Amino acid sequence: MMKKIVVVGDTSVGKTSLVSKYVDDYYPGDHLTTIGVDFKLKKVQKNGRKIDLTIWDTGGQERFKSITKSYFKGAHAVILVYACNCEESFANIIDWLLTIENCAEENVVKIMVANKSDVEELIVSHEKGRAFAEEHGCFFYPCSSVTGKNIDKIFNKIIDELRETD
Ligand code: GDP
Ligand code: MG
């Protein structure tokens, strides 16, 4: 079966790095601007059944435009990313939540992730992030695309939460 995961969040929070680390175990390092949307495919298994995860890595500029509904059409899970050294990216998560509310299906799995947890100075504490995530019906993980911390956990959680049907 095929499952669709959409990754959203402000530009530069590390969406492309996170996806690359998970799919290819590769941290790209330099900033490569994502324009529009990139797709990556990861083949996984759940209870012996094959699942193709299609991961949509969005550019981040969409927040300023009216988002294309097709991004979220048929999405099974959404990963909302902010960087824990960037207050603004955290503040903007609420806009992404509203967009999801408008454009995604009601039962979509929502995971909020605090990327760049490897940085020395955390501007947004994990406690604050977690409380906000819980308030909005999201699972929460701090993670780092540099060290790989929790990257697999994020996707394993999604796989766990996916329903076998649809
Ligand atoms: P995107 O615009 O959200 O796709 O962000 P990118 O993946 O292009 O990353 C933006 C910048 O942040 C790049 O310079 C990355 O090297 C850096 N970056 C991404 N993830 C991490 C992380 O976990 N920790 C740190 N310290 N830097 C990161
Ligand atoms: Mg990108």
Image: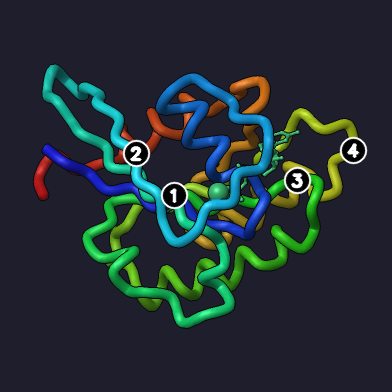
Determine whether 90 is above or below 126 in the image: below
Residue at figure coordinates x 14%, y 25% from the top left: 50
Quarter residue 23 falls in: top left
Image quarter of the N terminus: top left
Relative to residue 132, is residue 22 drawn left or right? left
Of labels 4 and 2, earlier in sequence is 2
Near-viewer residue (131 or 20)? 20
Which of the two marks, 3 or 1, is nearer to us in this view? 1
Tag of residue 57: 1
Quarter of the image for residue 161 reads top left
Horizontal and vertical percent for residue 124? Answer: 80, 49
Q: Are marks 1 and 2 in contact (CB under 8 Å)?
A: yes
Amino acid found under the numbered disc labelled 2: Lys
Q: Secondary structure at mark 1?
A: strand
Helix, strand or loop under label 2: strand
Q: Please state which amino acid type lies under the numbered disc 1.
A: Asp
**Which residue, given by chain and number where applicable, does mark 4 sit on?**
121
C-alpha distance separating marks 2 and 3 = 25 Å
Q: Secondary structure at mark 3?
A: loop
Amino acid type, mark 4: Glu
Q: Which mark is residue 84?
A: 3
Is ligand 2 within 8 Å of the beta carbon of the residue shown at mark 1? yes
Q: Position of residue 108 (x, y in %)?
A: 32, 57
Residue drawn at point x = 27 percent, y = 37 percent: 53
CA gap between label 1 and label 2 equals 8 Å
Label 3 crowd bin: few (<14), some (14–19), many (20+), radius 10 Å = many
Q: Quadrant of ligand 1?
A: top right
